[in-house]
Amino acid sequence: MIAFGLVFYLALGVLSRLMPQVQIFFVAMPLNVFAGLSIFALSLGSILNVWLRHIENFAQSMN
């Protein structure tokens, strides 16, 4: 998500220089929020699998 944010804002900065009459950051903010939430939703399944595996290992070590 950090890499996406850096690339996204770099592209917005270039677009802002190319089209100074358009408020690029105002137009692109909903896209940024939507893309960030989408990336988070897509990665949530694998994050939860890793977390559950660690919890299972911890529970087994407590027995």
Image: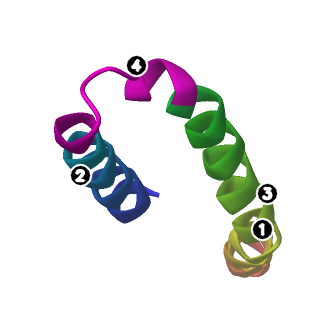
Mark sitting earlier along the chain (3/4): 4
Mark sitting earlier along the chain (2/1): 2
In front: label 2 or label 4: 4
Left or right: 28, with 39 as reference point? left
Tag 4: amino acid? Gln
Marks 4 and 2: in contact by CB < 8 Å? no
Question: Which element carries disc 3, helix, strand or loop?
Answer: helix
Tag 3: amino acid? Ala
- Residue under numbered circle 1: 42
Distance from label 3 to label 1 (Cα)?
4 Å
Distance from label 2 to label 1 (Cα)?
23 Å
Distance from label 2 to label 4 (Cα)?
15 Å
53 versus 3 height, above or below: below
Residue 33 spot, x, y in % from top left: 63, 35
* The quadrant where residue 44 appears: bottom right
Q: Residue at x 79, y 77 (%)?
A: 49
In front: label 3 or label 2: 2
Distance from label 3 to label 2 (Cα)?
23 Å
- Residue under numbered circle 4: 23
Q: Residue at x 56, y 40 (%)?
A: 32
45 versus 6 height, above or below: below
Marks 4 and 1: in contact by CB < 8 Å? no
Marks 1 and 3: in contact by CB < 8 Å? yes
Mark sitting earlier along the chain (1/4): 4
Tag 2: amino acid? Leu
Q: Nearer the viewer, residue 37 or 34?
A: 34
- Residue under numbered circle 2: 10
Distance from label 1 to label 4 (Cα)?
30 Å
Tag 1: amino acid? Leu
